[in-house]
Image: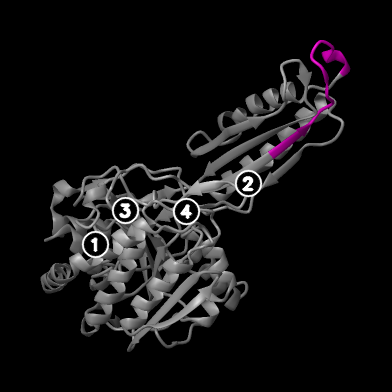
Amino acid sequence: MKPGALPLLLALLSTAAAQETVRAPFDKADAEAVSTWLDEHMDELVAVYKHLHANPELSLRERKTAARLGRSLGGDGYQVTGGVGGTGVVAVLENGEGPTLLIRGDMDALPIVEQTGLPYASEVRLEADDGTEVGAMHACGHDVHTTMLVGAGKALAEMRDRWSGTLVLIGQPAEEVGKGARMMIADGLFERFPKPDLCLALHVKHDRPAGTVGYRAGWAAANVDSVDITIFGKGGHGAKPHSSVDPVVVAAHVITSLQTLVSRRVDPIEPAVVTVGSIHGGTKHNIIPGEVKLQLTVRSYTDAVRDTLLDGIRQITADTCRVFGCPKPPLVVVKDEYTPACYNHPGLTEAAARLFRQLLGEAKVHENPPTMGGEDFGTYARVLEALRRSRQPGRARDHLPLFRGAIPVGTPAHGRGAVRGGYAGDARALAPIIGTASPIWRLAGLRVSCALAGARRVRCAVAQKRTNFCALRLPVRPVSARPLPGQGRRRGS
C-alpha cells in the first residue's frame, strides 16, 4: 500500500459501526482502487503543487489560487461559487443520499523570501500592507493542502460509484492570520451551501518521515490569542528618574508578574503559556520614554484556562500601573486573530489509528505529543455546534466532533472512510491531529495531517459519554439511521 493512498481511502472508508467500540473496517478493494488512481494522476498533481509553490499569494489576496482551484473543481463536475468570505471557493457535488462531508484546503502563503534553491522556488516580491516590500512563500505547506483538495475533488468525482452523499469542498483564505474560517462562515457558508455532518482538513508538518502517520488523542492544538499592551508613563531625563514615571520599570514588573499566571493561578495539570515576545520603548540611553509597548502570545486548551489567563493579564497590568502611579490606565487589547483549541475524540482517533496500522504496519504509525500551536479549522465545528444548539433552545445538544486525522496524502486522498461521530462533552471544538508525509511531498520531507468531524445519528456510548454516531458501509448508506428526538431528516444527511 502506497502511503499516498491513505487520505483518499479515509474519505471513502466505510465508517465506524454505531457500537460502544468504534471500528474502522479495512476494505482492500478501495485501497487498490485508490492506489491505481494515484499511479495514473501523480504527475498531474505534482505539477499542480509546483505551480502553486512557485506562485504564492498572501492572506486575503489569494485571487489567482482561488481561480485555478475553481476551474479545476468546476471541470470535475462541481457547482463552484467564488468570492465566499473574500477570496474563498466553495464547490458542491451531490451524489445521492448520505452524509455531507466538508473538505477544506487553505490557500494563503507567508511573507517570507524563499531560500530553498528549488527549481520551482518562489521569486515573488510584493508590497505588504504597511508599504514595505516582502517576499511570498508557501513555507507552511498550503500549496500542499490546495493540491490535495484538487486531487481529492477529482478522485472522489471519478469514484462516485464507491460512495454516496454530498461533498462540500472549500478553498479557504487567510488561515495564516486566523480570519479565513470566520470570514467564510460570516458570508453564509452554512446557510448558502449544504451544512456538513463532518469536516476534513489537512496540514503538513516536517517532523515525520515520508510514509509515516502520527496521531494524538485528546487535546492536540491550543487556543491561540495575541495581546497588545501599552503602558503609559511620564517621560523624563535619565539622570532625574524621581521626576518621572518610568514605563520601562513598570513593564519589567508586569512581565515578571505575568509568569505567575501559569505558575500560581492555573491548575498545574492544565497546559498554559504566556509569552512576551516583543517589548519596545524609548529612543536613547538617557531618556525615560513616555510609553512602552508589549506583544504577547497566550496559549491554552480549555476555555476556562483561557479566561483565567486573559483576565489575569488585564488585572496584573492594570494593578501594576496603579501601584507605580502611571498617569493613566494601560491599554490591553486582545486581538481578534483568536483560533480555538482542537480536542481529539479518543474513540475516533483510535479508530483511525487502527486503520493506519492495518494499511501501513505498526512501525509506521506513532502517537504524537500534544502541541500548543493552533489554526482556525476548529472554528467550523464550534459554529456548527452553536447552530445546532440554537435550533433547540434549552436542550442539551450532542457536539459535532472534529477528528483531526493524520493521513499520508500523496494525493489529496481524503479518501476511504469518514470516521465520524459526535460527543456530548464540553463545548469546545473536537479535532484530533494526525500527521504524515506522502510521495508528492517527499521532496520537501513534509508530513500531512488532516481533520474529520462527526455525524449525528444513532445513539451509542463511547467512554461513558452519550454520543451520536453513524455506521456506514460503501456505498455510503446510513445504518440504523433513525433521527434523534427533535431532529427531522434532511437532504444530504
Q: Residue at x 45, y 45 (%)?
A: 112
The percent position of residue 122, horizontal first and vertical second, equals: 37, 52
Of circles 4 and 2, the one toward us is: 4
Report the residue marked by disc 2: 307
Question: Which residue is situated farthest in the top direction here?
Answer: 239
What residue is rendered at 84% in x and 12% in y?
240
Q: Kindly state the secondary structure of the residue where label 1 is placed.
A: helix
Would you name the residue on which mark 3 appears?
A: 434
Is residue 313 shown above or below 458? Answer: above
Q: CA distance from mark 3 to mark 1?
A: 23 Å
Compared to residue 294, the image places residue 393 above or below, namely below
Q: In this rendering, would 338 be left or right of 120? A: right
Tell me the CA gap for discs 3 and 4.
Answer: 14 Å
Please name whichever residue, 18 or 386, is drawn nearer the observer in this view of the structure: 386
Q: Which residue is mark 1?
A: 46
Which residues fall within the magenta stretch?
Answer: 229-243
Q: State the SS at label 2.
A: helix
Of labels 1 and 2, earlier in sequence is 1
